[in-house]
């Protein structure tokens, strides 16, 4: 299920600018969508064992639905 920019609810969070309309879903946006912290989403995406299997699956499903792609520049840091 792909949300339309008007349905995302991110516009008010990002100063009236809807970042999803640009086609880029950030880790922060994914975390807000799920009601989780950025740290939890990051750890779930990276398979940390202290994150429950259910949460990892929930994060992965949302990431796929929203077409989240990791920022390659950030991953190189």
Image (cartoon, rainbow, N blue to C red):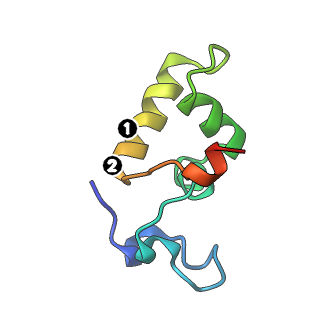
Task: Give residue 47's position: percent from left, percent from top.
Answer: 56, 22
Q: Is residue 37 visible?
A: no
- Which residue was labeled with disc 1? 61
The answer to whether residue 40 is above or below residue 24 is above
Q: Which SS class for mark 1?
A: helix
Q: Which SS class for mark 2?
A: helix
- Which residue was labeled with disc 2? 65
The residue lying furthest to the bottom in this view is 16
The answer to whether residue 41 is above or below residue 6 is above
* Residue displayed at 64% across by 73% down: 13
Left or right: 21 as drawn, with respect to 19:
left
* Residue displayed at 39% across by 78% down: 6
The answer to whether residue 2 is above or below residue 59 is below
Task: Give residue 18's position: percent from left, percent from top.
Answer: 51, 78
Quadrant location of the C terminus in the rendered image = top right
Task: Give residue 5's position: percent from left, percent from top.
Answer: 39, 75
Q: Are marks 1 and 2 in contact (CB under 8 Å)?
A: yes
Q: Is residue 68 visible?
A: yes
Q: CA distance from mark 1 to mark 2?
A: 6 Å
* Residue displayed at 63% across by 20% down: 48
Task: Give residue 44's position: percent from left, percent from top.
Answer: 57, 29
Quarter of image, res 26 = bottom right
């Amino acid at each position: 299920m792909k949300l339309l920019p008007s349905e995302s609810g991110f516009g008010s969070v990002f100063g009236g600018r809807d970042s999803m309309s640009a086609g880029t879903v950030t880790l922060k946006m994914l975390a807000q969508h799920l009601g989780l912290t950025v740290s939890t989403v990051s750890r779930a995406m990276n398979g940390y064992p202290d994150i429950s299997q259910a949460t990892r699956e929930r994060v992965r499903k949302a990431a796929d639905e929203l077409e989240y792609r990791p920022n390659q520049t950030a991953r190189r840091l």
